[in-house]
Image (cartoon, rainbow, N blue to C red):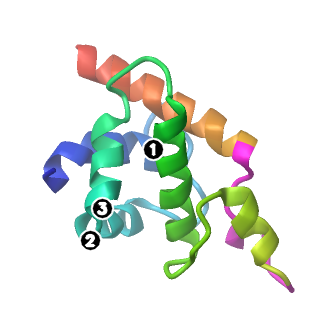
């Protein structure tokens, strides 16, 4: 997959007119990750292709989110990464919880799907 094919999905997921963004985790971090990782590129090519978010797509989004918050993590689920970040950390250093990430992903998916159909 080409990076440019994934950019619409990355744009929607990292924050746009109808979807919020995560504090300190903007488009540059996301684009750098999709440039280096074909699986992440494929994930964002598929975002917005259907009106619903499949379990497989959400699992890939979780893995991507973990990588945006901690580049070298083995965590594949955001709740796992939240628990692993022990100590004195601010809320901005934590990824969203699973439920919040799912809602965010659905908003991005819906906005992306609406964009792609026009």
Q: Position of residue 40 (x, y in %)?
A: 35, 56
Q: How many marks?
A: 3
Whether tag 3 and tag 1 are in contact, CB under 8 A, the answer is no
The answer to which quarter of the image holds residue 80 is bottom right
Q: Residues within 10 Å of mark 3 (few under 14, many from 20)?
A: many
Asked whether residue 17 is in view, the answer is yes
**Residue displayed at 75% across by 58% down:** 79
In this view, the residue farthest toward the bottom is 87
Q: CA distance from mark 3 to mark 2?
A: 5 Å
Instruction: Residue at 30%, 22% (x, y): give it.
Output: 115
Tell me the quarter of the picture where residue 107 sits. Answer: top right
State the residue at coordinates (74%, 40%): 99
- Relative vertical location of residue 85 with respect to residue 115 in this rendering, above or below: below
Tell me the residue that label 1 is attached to. Answer: 13
The residue carrying mark 3 is 34
Q: Which residues are magenta?
A: 87-98
Is residue 45 placed above or below 114 in the rendered structure? below
Query: Magenta span has 96?
Result: yes
Nearer-the-camera pick, 54 or 115: 54
Q: Residues within 10 Å of mark 1 (few under 14, many from 20)?
A: many
Separation of marks 3 and 1 at Cα, in angstroms: 13 Å
Q: Earlier in the sequence, mark 2 or mark 1?
A: 1
Residue at the image point whose x is 49% and y is 78% from the top: 71
Residue lying farthest top? Answer: 118
Q: Earlier in the sequence, mark 3 or mark 1?
A: 1
Q: Position of residue 75 (x, y in %)?
A: 62, 69
Magenta-highlighted stretch: main secondary structure?
loop
Residue wearing tag 2? 36
């Amino acid at each position: 997959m080409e990076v440019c094919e994934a950019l619409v999905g990355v744009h929607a997921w990292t924050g746009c007119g109808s979807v919020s963004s995560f504090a300190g985790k903007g488009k540059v971090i996301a684009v750098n990750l999709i440039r280096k990782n074909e699986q992440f590129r494929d994930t964002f090519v598929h975002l917005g292709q259907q009106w619903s978010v499949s379990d497989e797509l959400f699992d890939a989004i979780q893995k991507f989110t973990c990588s945006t918050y901690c580049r070298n993590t083995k965590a594949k689920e955001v709740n796992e990464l939240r628990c692993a970040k022990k100590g004195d950390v601010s809320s901005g250093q934590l990824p969203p919880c699973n439920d919040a990430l799912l809602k965010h992903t659905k908003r991005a998916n819906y906005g992306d799907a609406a964009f792609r159909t026009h």
